[in-house]
Image (cartoon, rainbow, N blue to C red):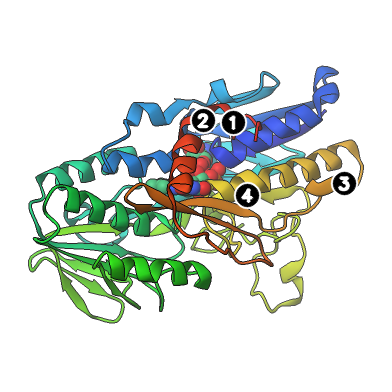
Amino acid sequence: MQRVVVLGGGVGGTLTANLVARKLKRLIAAGDAKVTVVDETGQHAYQPGYMYIAMGNERPEKLHRPERSLLDDDVDLVVDTVVRIDPETSLVELRSGGKIHFDQLVIATGSRILPEAIKDFETEAYHFYTAEASARLRKALDAFTGGKLVIGIAGIPYKCPPAPLEVAFLIEAELRARGLREKTQLTFLSPINRAFTIESVSDMATPIFAEKGIDLQLLAGVDSIDAERKVVITDAMEEYPYDLLICVPPHKGAQVVIDSGLAPKSGWLPTDRKTLQVKHLVASNTPDADIPRYPNIYALGDATDLPLSKAGSTAHFEAPIVAERVSARVMGREPEGKDAGYTGKVMCFFEVGDGKGTLLQFDYDHPPKPPKPNQLWHLGKIIFNKTYWHTVPKGRV
Ligand SMILES: Cc1cc2nc3c(=O)[nH]c(=O)nc-3n(C[C@H](O)[C@H](O)[C@H](O)COP(=O)(O)OP(=O)(O)OC[C@H]3O[C@@H](n4cnc5c(N)ncnc54)[C@H](O)[C@@H]3O)c2cc1C
């Protein structure tokens, strides 16, 4: 019996498990293979929808479904928290005390937000990285009557790089519609030396900040908050007063991969850019750095250290590669076809407000060339959001 264990039932884990189960259908039917997903909540979240709760056009209950309903019947689900991964004994330890043996392991445990890492963040700053936080932000926006509205980012990388820019553009449009724009000074604090990490996207977004009269400040990552004086302090020790502060919280990878010695303190797993196998945890200039440490352990989605957007789209395009490579190992053959290696493909919609959007499509070798924002790409995002449950996790697109 070959056992494939997938940690995490988010977009990356769910899709990978379904694709592996389809490739191993005969072996599973014969009792020679088994695919198991372990997820701590048993609930699948469609996180891109969280932003729309804050914008007033999405409801939290629409963004969560039982993980079981998204998995093929051939896939087993264990609802438990993984507390340790032991690659030497090929065992995964669960909080309940149980252990699961694996022959092939897929780590898709995503990322964590750590608002508590910044003093007074939880009482002073609003964000949209959980359904509850986003609902709280909506209430704050409803109560806002003008003043200094600051949008910042506390550390890179974070989930969905376009999201804070989208929020800035959507809030600007909302304030205009509510007659509050003239009464609001809107400031966006970018942690890097341009509006967005990718240069071509930055070139597209920078004029939009100017057109909308949003003050774009560069090299202004959020470092701390002075709740008493109501100022946010950047890495460069600049101070920005706020009446309403919206801030992307710090992010890290899952604690379990740190505790298991597979990832550094950041929690991002060293991952091979093509095979998606987990590599040695050593400095990138040492001889072992590029060799898979455990050829039977893979990572995808937010969990990796790959220089790509932490996006559902990244996990979506990585899953077929992990599924092909894992299934090939189970069947004792070489990975084959278009899914033999990952090319860095990512495709994300990007809202710019006023019912318009654009598309970021790129891979390792081809940076995005975002088309001029129009209504079509905004509609594309809305349709994608509505159809997600029937498409991506089930491997239908
Ligand atoms: C506001 C917002 C907007 C976004 N917008 C977009 C967008 O427009 N487009 C886009 O492509 N992406 C977007 N994203 C990002 C996208 O949601 C994530 O990148 C994606 O969910 C990552 O998928 P994943 O499978 O790696 O991790 P996740 O989907 O986060 O799944 C991880 C799973 O692992 C489980 N888990 C974690 N630790 C353990 C453990 N120890 N034991 C057991 N289970 C564990 C969790 O319960 C979870 O189910 C957005 C995210 C947010 C928050």
Residue 122: percent from left, percent from top:
22, 52
Of the two numbered discs 1 and 4 on the same chain, state the one appearing first in sequence.
4
At label 3, the amino acid type is: Glu
Q: Earlier in the sequence, mark 1 or mark 3?
A: 3
215 sits left or right of 17 in the view: left
- Looking at the rendered structure, the secondary structure element under dot 1 is loop
Secondary structure of the residue carrying numbered label 2: helix
Q: CA distance from mark 4 to mark 3?
A: 19 Å
Q: Nearer the viewer, mark 1 or mark 4?
A: 1
Instruction: Say which mark, if any, is on residue 336.
Output: 3
Please tell me which residue is depicted at 66% across the width and 74% down the height of the picture.
284
Q: Between residues 380 and 393, which one lies in front from this camera angle?
A: 380
Label 4 beta carbon less than 8 Å to ligand 1 = yes
Does residue 347 lie above or below 67 as drawn? Answer: below
Residue for badge 4: 300
In this orientation, does residue 318 appear? yes
Q: Amino acid at mark 2?
A: Thr
Which residue is found at the position 18% from the left and 72% from the top?
240
Q: Which residue has dot 2 on it?
A: 387
Question: Answer yes or no: do the residues labelled 1 and 2 have beta carbons within 8 Å?
Answer: yes
In the rendered image, the quadrant that contains the N terminus is top right
Marks 1/3: CA distance?
24 Å
Q: Give the Cα separation between the discs numbered 1 and 4.
A: 19 Å
Q: Residue furthest right?
A: 333
N-terminal of the pair, mark 2 or mark 3, is: 3
Viewed as shown, does residue 337 lie left or right of 4?
right
Q: SS for tag 4?
A: loop
Q: Where residue 245 sits: x, y (%)?
A: 20, 59
**Amino acid type shown at disc 4:** Leu
Judge whether 61 appears above or below 320 on screen: above
The image's mark for residue 391 is 1
Does the image show residue 88? no
